[in-house]
Image (cartoon, rainbow, N blue to C red):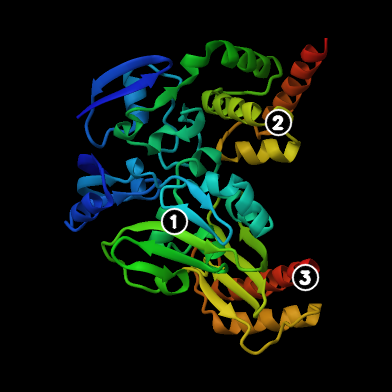
Amino acid sequence: MLTIREYKQAATLEEAWQLNQKRPNRLLGGMLWMRLSKGNVQTAIDLSALGLDTIEETETEFRIGAMVSLRQLELHEGFTAYSEGANKEALRHIVGVQFRNLATVGGSVFGRFGFSDVLTLLLVMDSYVELYKGGIVPLADFVNMPYDRDILVRIIVKKTAAHYSYKSVRISKTDFPVLTCAAALTQEGVQAAVGARPAKAALVKDAEQLATLPMTAEKAQAFAEYAAGLLPTETNPRGSAAYRTHLIKVLTARCLTELGGKA
Amino acid sequence: MEITLTLNGKKLTRMVEADTVLLDFLRKEGCYSVKRGCDTTNCGLCTVFMDDKPVLSCAILAARAAGHSIVTMEGMQQEAAEFGAFIADQGAEQCGFCNPGMIMNAIALLRENSEPTEEEIKEFLAGNLCRCSGYEGQLRGIQNFIAWKKAQAQA
């Protein structure tokens, strides 16, 4: 059971950061995952009053506030157009609309959860996190940084010219995924992010130019095999390591085939 | 701590503990349509509207609702009664425990999309679990309600 002694809506990021330096205090995201945890929180720090619940779209990038809900990201017309619907495919399977109206993008990304569809999707894009003290860091680096007590302010997604595809496998609707896979076709070639292995999402780039255009089923399969060889998998109650490795091959090849059709 | 919010159109000021969840707050205020089901943010029984958006009241601190408008089924009697009665007439419910959450979320769907496809209905209501109807009755009931509303509008 989670107990909270005090609730504080921070008036500034500095106030939130200062409060967050004390070990018994915790920042609130959407509170969906935290709600299921156990422990005693001295002060729950809420960022809701800091205006971080909007998605700003400019000519060159999307600036997604940490408190933007998953539902906002799912329904944002500009982001949907840019991601070619990959955002909807990544988000629509997450529990239900009521859940996605609460869960925040910042909470999903800062948590770097293994099961995160959001992290998988953003990782395959040209994404950065803006940390209050740590500045702007590529998401690919942030994923592997140790947890600290900084504050994730927003996620920045550059409008790099690319095509996107997203696929996941679940045992039943609304469950955690057994595997998630996002792929991108950029001017540098293809890359894939694979999550729920069950470890957090990791990125594989086509360093060996296996899947150049025009895409064929053989090239897609060759890159899928390459990715599966690089990404370790593990067993948990949702699937065995061998099954997940097989799924990496299947989902990556399907994503690349889809990308080939968009090129 | 003291919070002020609007509940079903009425402004309220109350004292709450920092870790009181909205679900408990609402039931204490007499909103018994708001049910505790799974208590793990999965079942949708505790669905209420926060600033017109369906949310899970089991996962929100009451403190976070301060300054917002909360609507439960008690606050939308006419709309909920019309839809609920129709669903009952269709035999689309069994034990009825999940009904308040399902009705709230179905109304949210119909406000957002008045003519959803079967797939859109299933997707929007995926966060509302029902252990006895098998969902088919609910789906049929919602589709028939939409057709009935459309026929009414055209009449």
| CA gap, disc 3 and disc 2 | 38 Å
Q: Element type at marker 1?
A: helix
Q: Nearer the viewer, residue B143 or B98?
A: B143
Kind of residue at disc 3: Ala
Measured as percent of width and height from the top left, residue A10 is found at: 26, 44
Check disc 3 and report the residue beneath it: A263
Image quadrant where one finds the N terminus of chain A: top left
Cα separation between marks 1 and 2: 31 Å
Q: Check disc 1 and report the residue beneath it.
A: A108
The relative height of residue A10 versus residue A219 in the rendered view (above or below) is: above
Q: Mark 2 lies on which chain?
A: B
Where is residue A231 drawn, in percent x and y?
A: 54, 79
Which quarter of the rendering shows the C terminus of chain A?
A: bottom right
Camera-side mark, 1 or 2: 1
**In the rendered structure, which amino acid carries the disc numbered 2?**
Leu
Q: Residue B51: percent from the left, percent from the top?
A: 46, 28
Displayed quadrant of residue B39: top left
